[in-house]
Each structure stands twice: as structure tokens, then as C-alpha cells.
Image (tube, rainbow, N blue to C red):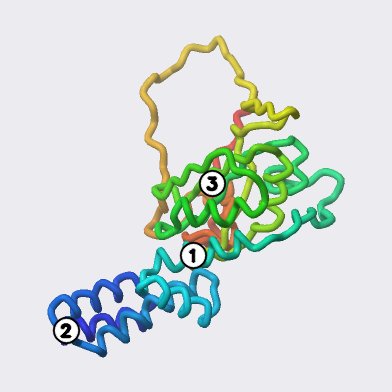
């Protein structure tokens, strides 16, 4: 009874993964509890619907795959990927003559073949990303970094990379909207299937290092749940950032440029 009540409370709070574990514990103790089976199915249905699928499609996929969430989502993504479709042309750009951020310009002026995908939730698998992104071109490799909530998609040509950014920017996947940019170190298309790694120029200096010990890098929030980058150099996630943006603290910790 305790696990059952806890599961219902967790569903009400939107803690669907925790709710599934609670109902699974009920069924471990009492395999014949029909109410727990129904509640578990309802929680899993919500998980698939939050991934961006309709209730009817989610229910059908779950029933066909033994009510296993990951297999159902994989099947739905594979179905959408296998549907024949002509390559999607890029929408006319709304940027001015010089875009404010070239890294988010789908016309891909630098001819890059790699894209960085942010807001990747832990439940998003490499197979799910492959099914979603291969709809827009041939993929050379994918690297998912759950500890940094991101992934890198390397296409075989620059046209596919720009098309994927144009089509999937802001796409909702497992409850969050994807943020897509071109990375700093990316592969550039040089034609005839030749890809060259682009790296920013390295500036050299004759000044000796004052302190060779590396300084600890801040990765998480400050002051509890406040965004570190909002307080310093600026947060690229904007309204999609998982941490709090306090208007009066924008750029408050940013260091001034040294003057000669």
C-alpha cells in the first residue's frame, strides 16, 4: 500500500521515472495487483507522450512492445525515420547580411559537417538520436555525453548538417527542446568526400606562465540554483536554461578587459 500511494503521489508531481519504480516494487511484492499494473501502464504512457508522440501512437507502440518505454520510443522514431520523404530545403533565412551568431545559422556559411546538440536528457539514447537526425542526411558518427547534457552529430557533408539544424532546432524530445549549434572544433566539407578538422587559430605569447597549476573550472550553478554563465559571460541557452536567471545579476561577475 505504501509503495502504491507513493507512486500515485509521484505521478501527480510529474516524477514519472520514480513512479514507475514504485509501481514495479508493488508488483514485485504482489504480482497479481491489477491496480498497480494499470497505474504503471498509465505512467509509462505519460513518459512516451512527453517525448512528443500522440496518446494513440504511444499506447499502440507500448502495447506492441510489452509496455517497455525505451523500445516503444525507438520504434516510433524508427517509423518516422523510415517514412519516404524528399530532402527538406532550407527555409529562407531571416538573418541580416551578417548573422549575429554564425554558430546558429542553418545556411552553414563555414561549410561545417558537425553539429552540437544541447538539452539532451538522460533517457535519450544514441539510437533515438540516430533515428531522428539521419532523416536529414548520412551520419558519420554520433557521440552522446549525458554528463554534459549534450551530443555531437557528425554528418558526411555540410548540406546535411545545415538541413538538420533548420529542421530540428527547438524540436521537443523527451520533454525538453533541443538546442543546436555548430561547434568550435568541427569537420568542414572540402568536397569530394574530404572532411578537414577546423580549429581556431592558436595565439602564442612569450610571457612565462605565472602559475602553472590549473584553476578549478565552475561547471554548475552558483548561489544554489542561479546560472553561473548568466552572471558572467552570458548564457547561450536563454529561456531554455535549467538554472535561474536573475535579471539584476546579468553580467554582475564578468571581469573587465585589461587595459594597457
Q: Is residue 16 above or below residue 201?
A: below
Q: Position of residue 123 (x, y in %)?
A: 41, 60
Q: Where does label 1 land, which residue?
A: 75
> Contact (CB < 8 A) between labels 2 and 1?
no
Q: Characterize the local packing of mark 3: few (<14), some (14-19) or many (20 or more) Cα atoms within 10 angstroms.
A: some
Residue 196 at x, y = what percent? 65, 26
Q: The N terminus appears in which quarter of the rendering?
A: bottom left
N-terminal label among 1 and 3: 1
Q: Quadrant of the C terminus?
A: top right
189 left or right, relative to 219: right
Which residue is disc 2 drawn over? 2
Would you call the spot at circle 2 few (<14 residues within 10 Å), some (14-19), or many (20 or more)? few
Q: Nearer the viewer, residue 186 or 249?
A: 186
| Secondary structure state at the residue bearing disc 1 | helix
Helix, strand or loop status at disc 2: helix
Looking at the picture, tell me which residue is in the foreground, 172 or 232. 172
Dot 3 corresponds to which residue? 232
Extreme top residue here? 206
Marks 3/2: CA–CA distance? 46 Å
Which residue sits furthest right? 97
Where 191 falls versus 130 (above or below)? above
Q: Which percent across, then down, holds residue 36?
A: 25, 85
The quarter holding residue 139 reads top right
Residue at left offset 75%, top offset 54%: 87
Amino acid at each position: 500500500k505504501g509503495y502504491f500511494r507513493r507512486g500515485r503521489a509521484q505521478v501527480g508531481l510529474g516524477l514519472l521515472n520514480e513512479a514507475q519504480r514504485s509501481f514495479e516494487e508493488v508488483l514485485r511484492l504482489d504480482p497479481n495487483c491489477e491496480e498497480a499494473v494499470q497505474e504503471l501502464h498509465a505512467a509509462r504512457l505519460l513518459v512516451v507522450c512527453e517525448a512528443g508522440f500522440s496518446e494513440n501512437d504511444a499506447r499502440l507502440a507500448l502495447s506492441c512492445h510489452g509496455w517497455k518505454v525505451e523500445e516503444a520510443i525507438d520504434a516510433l522514431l524508427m517509423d518516422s525515420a523510415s517514412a519516404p520523404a524528399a530532402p527538406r530545403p532550407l527555409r529562407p533565412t531571416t538573418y541580416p547580411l551578417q548573422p549575429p551568431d554564425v554558430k546558429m545559422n542553418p545556411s552553414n556559411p563555414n561549410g561545417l559537417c558537425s553539429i552540437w546538440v544541447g538539452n539532451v536528457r538522460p533517457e535519450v539514447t544514441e539510437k533515438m538520436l540516430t533515428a531522428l537526425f539521419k532523416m536529414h542526411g548520412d551520419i558519420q558518427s554520433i557521440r552522446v555525453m549525458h554528463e554534459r547534457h549534450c551530443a555531437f552529430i557528425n554528418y558526411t557533408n555540410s548540406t546535411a548538417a545545415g538541413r538538420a539544424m533548420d529542421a530540428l532546432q527547438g524540436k521537443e524530445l523527451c520533454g525538453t527542446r533541443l538546442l543546436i549549434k555548430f561547434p568550435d572544433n568541427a569537420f568542414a566539407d572540402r568536397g569530394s568526400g574530404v572532411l578537414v578538422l577546423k580549429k581556431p587559430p592558436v595565439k602564442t605569447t612569450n610571457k612565462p606562465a605565472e602559475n602553472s597549476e590549473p584553476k578549478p573550472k565552475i561547471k554548475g550553478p552558483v548561489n544554489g540554483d542561479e546560472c553561473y554563465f548568466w552572471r558572467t559571460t552570458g548564457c547561450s541557452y536563454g529561456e531554455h536554461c535549467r538554472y535561474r536567471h536573475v535579471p539584476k545579476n546579468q553580467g554582475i561577475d564578468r571581469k573587465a578587459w585589461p587595459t594597457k
